[in-house]
Amino acid sequence: MADIIKLLPDHVANQIAAGEVVQRPASVVKELLENAIDAGATSIKLIIKDGGKTLIQVVDDGKGMSETDARLSFERHATSKISSAQDLFNLHTKGFRGEALASIAAIAHVDMQTRLEGSEVGTHIKIEGSKIVSQEVVAMPKGTSISVKNLFFNIPARRNFLKSNQVELRHITDEFHRVALVHPNIAFHFYNNGSEIFSLPKTKHRQRIAHIFGSRMEDRLVPVTEETEVVKISGFICKPEFSKKSRGEQFFFANDRYIKSPYLHHAVVAAFEGLIKTDMHPGYFLYLEVDPSSIDINIHPTKTEVKFDDENTLYAILRSTIKHSLGQFNVAPVLDFDHDPNLDTPYAYKEKDVVLPKVTVDASFNPFKETGTVSRVSRSFQKPSTKGWEGLYEGLQSDAEGDTFSSVVIESEGEEQGTLYSEDELAEHMATTFQLRRKFVVSTVKSGMLVIHQNRAHERILFEKFLGEITVKEGVSQQLLFPLELTFNKQDLGILNEIQESLSNIGFAFESLEHETVKVTGMPLAVPESGIGTVLDRLISDYKEGFSDGSLSQAEVLAKALSKNLAVKTGDVLDQESQLALVNNLFACKEPTLSPFQKLTYTIISEGDIDKKFS
Ligand code: ADP
Ligand code: MG
């Protein structure tokens, strides 16, 4: 029989290899940035168009390449970084496999210009799908510029698989952050579709973090340092009170590479134990330095998981170091769990006299109430509400006047159909709802006992309300007498812009100012003024998470995030009226049975079931 094994042509082999190295535009960004850093650049520009699908360009002022090296760099396993297997155990560069450029060139149009410091002219090479299409000399500054255009032009299936430009940009931005955070001594500029979105001057770690994540980050950071034989640890943790509901800023770097390590993450969380609630996530930027031979570097280029030789020791050291920092900087005794400093009166307001807002509130108005008799027109407001939503955040205290809740929940605008009780029955039921363990609202219905999960039910009610408002644009806005100025980092500002229209539909009003600052001039009635920063922060981070799965509409993601953040929680005390309103509004919903997160909102325990217990 004839021999049947053939060697794959290089360009095919490269395409296959490319599939592993280049998963999306962000992978190209990572490889190009790393090459620029390995080349000793002091200033790096990243230029992106259309989420990297049209263009990814990295310009550096590093050492450049000779004409021969420029051509060779696109060959597979062409690397200047190792020459023997032994070198693998003492790596100080990011690249070493010599795979990236070959892989990228196999699946895109690549245009490279590079000049060595000593040379008079540089080399300009164009490659399309692994084929060199032109090579010329070029006058240029020292360094290298690589443009990658039309990614996956020859693999339509992969190209179609890419997400929206916004989502791809977000992945690129994440990659950019990871690289920029380890190299504060390198200046970075990042342009997206022609506008500069990050301008990071050469600086120190702490300032780099603030330049990326917003200046308010600076006073939230607590330094961490430790040096042992096994590891040198440096970096910062965020003070416990600035922990977030979503994962937020959590970064580990080992020997200047971003890594993921669920195990070490656990060590950090363990150090925060008792200082933050279990559903909150601490922020951290931790840089570990270990002997390169004690860490498994033979990792796949796109993977960020690493293997340390002595993980248990690292775990113990990390945990105690962080505990120590928390203690030393006096941040440990923040034991008031329910107190969120973000919700304190903003500094500037503390000194001000109370001024009657233009919009006043009818103290007797109970928004939960879904009856036609207390006319909704009487939302003519009379008295400034000084409490209200804040209470929700701090854990409601039972309030005799019963209006703690009044400004809390906006009723579902649904018609009365669907209410469980008639007008007459209302009075009767007033006395027959009660709260069980600050978690359930219990009432009776014809067939037995109704048990409602207060948090989930309220999420459902708010979800439908906000979804309605976003789509029909009828949210009620409350003008702020003193507009609030809030700062956001660039990425969050971008998201805010993306969702601005929906937010204004539900009653938010903003103007953007310079320098990461946004002026909030109005907000939905349902949001407490002092909590607005927190609500927006959470909204943005929930939106980031919710949207990257791509299956939900923007309106749904936002309505979900808002309902999650604004719903009453387990532990909140509900007065009688609010309990009843919760029941009524839930059953006025289109889909009362499930929360927006697909959890059961209520159950009915039938008389039969109860009878059985007594049999
Ligand atoms: P690796 O980084 O693993 O060595 P790459 O395919 O990323 O492999 O790059 C191949 C080689 O091309 C590098 O080893 C380096 O010598 C050279 N090179 C790539 N990018 C640059 C750059 N921006 N400046 C100077 N040399 C570069
Ligand atoms: Mg490389």
Image: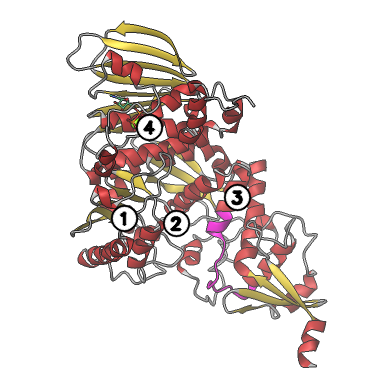
Ligand 2 within 8 Å of the CB at mark 4:
yes
Report the residue at 58% width, 56% height from top. 563
The dot on residue 559 is: 3
SS category of the residue bearing label 3: helix
Q: CA distance from mark 4 to mark 3?
A: 37 Å
Nearer the viewer's eye, disc 4 or disc 3? Answer: 4
Check disc 2 and give the amino acid type: Gly
Crowd rating for badge 1 (residues with CA inside 10 Å; few <14, some 14–19, many 20+): few
SS category of the residue bearing label 4: helix
Residue at image mark 4: 31
Q: CA distance from mark 2 to mark 4?
A: 41 Å
Along the polypeptide, which appears first: circle 2 or circle 3? 2
Q: CA distance from mark 2 to mark 3?
A: 17 Å
Q: Looking at the image, how many numbered discs can be counted on the residues?
A: 4
Along the polypeptide, which appears first: circle 4 or circle 1? 4
Q: Position of residue 460 (x, y in %)?
A: 65, 59
Residue at image mark 2: 531
Task: Pick the quarter of the image with the C terminus.
Answer: bottom right
Q: Relative to 110, does residue 251 appear above or below in the rendering?
A: below
Along the polypeptide, which appears first: circle 2 or circle 4? 4
Check disc 4 and give the amino acid type: Glu
Q: Position of residue 312 (x, y in %)?
A: 32, 64
The dot on residue 347 is: 1
Q: Position of residue 375 (x, y in %)?
A: 70, 59
Crowd rating for badge 2 (residues with CA inside 10 Å; few <14, some 14–19, many 20+): many
Is there CB contact under 8 Å for labels 2 and 4? no
Horizontal side, residue 282 vs residue 426: left or right: left
Check disc 1 and give the amino acid type: Tyr
Report the residue at 38% width, 46% height from top. 486
State ligand 2's quadrant. top left
